[in-house]
Amino acid sequence: MTILDNQFENQKAPRVPPVKNKGGQSAFFSCWDLHAYYGESYIVQGVSFDIREGEIVALLGRNGAGKTSTLRAIARVDEPEVRHGEIWLDHQGLHNMKSHGAAAVGVGLVPEDRRIIQGLTVEENLKLAQIAPPIGWSIERIYELFPRLGERRTQEGTTLSGGEQQMLAIGRTLARDVKLLLLDEPYEGLAPVIVQEIERTLEHIKTLGITTIIVEQNAIAALHLADRAIILDMGQVAFDGTAQEVLDNAELRQEYLAI
Ligand SMILES: Nc1ncnc2c1ncn2[C@@H]1O[C@H](COP(=O)(O)OP(=O)(O)OP(=O)(O)O)[C@@H](O)[C@H]1O
Ligand SMILES: [Mg+2]
């Protein structure tokens, strides 16, 4: 059974990447008409957008708008269950894959709770990420990006500070060959000085051209980093435009972001 074999099947969904970017070529990443559920709770309600290679997209919206659910749907995590829609990354269809398949073709989700593995050192956490191909950055390169991780390479990962754990979660994702980096609230619960440190790292990652979706409650920080902004409201796309448009539009920010 494919994702399309369900109550939406008579909508005759196209089987090729449907979304075209402004250049008229297939987008590097696109999701098309995603509908996803937790049990019978209908949460992601027809989300479509595309992303060009190297673009950074801020995915914003109020609490409960469906941001985390959309990232999880893209990463093909079991829940929410995607019952309709297509997801394409670099000409590969993710919609019929499970999370390990999506990871193998280059989706790297850095979840909100960071998921550092207990009982393993910083270095063992990074090495574990490289246990199977495709391998991305070397461990030394990750330590260059986050010198604090190098200094603490033998420390147990779960004893790191919140900011350091966030660095380890990002580093662990880069240890695999990522084509699409999904960051869920990377600044959550961190002191402003640590937020700035992680922001500098993300600025650096941006110069390397890694296509990224960043979800952040700190919308202003995310908008400064991002090229584009997509605002979700009640599981649907309410706005898709440049990050600058959102920074310039106080009414839009007030309506959907309450800032
Ligand atoms: N496991 C779950 N089971 C049932 N409903 C869920 C589950 N996870 C999330 N939801 C519901 O889905 C909706 C969207 O949640 P989601 O976590 O995607 O929002 P969000 O935009 O990331 O919010 P926040 O900014 O608070 O992180 C919410 O109404 C939430 O209660
Ligand atoms: Mg969330």
Image: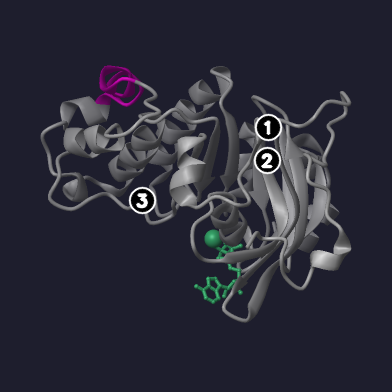
Q: Quadrant of the C terminus?
A: bottom right
Q: Is residue 84 visible?
A: yes
Tally of marks? 3
Q: What amino acid is at disc 3?
A: Arg
Report which residue position mark 3 lands on: 114
**Disc 2 + disc 1, Cβ < 8 Å:** yes
Pick whichever, 76 or 173, lies toward us: 76
| 3 lies above or below 228 | below
Left or right, residue 82 beside residue 177: right
Query: Which contiguous range is marked in magenta?
Result: 138-147
Q: Which numbered disc, 3 or 2, marks the residue closer to the eye?
A: 2
Q: Can residue 109 be seen in this view?
A: no
Q: Name the spot of residue 216 as percent of width and height, x first.
A: 57, 50
Look at the image and say whether residue 214 sits in the magenta stretch.
no
Pick whichever, 161 or 228, lies toward us: 228
| 15 lies above or below 8 | above
Seen as rendered, the residue at the extreme front is 1
- Look at the numbered disc 1 and give the secondary structure of its residue: loop
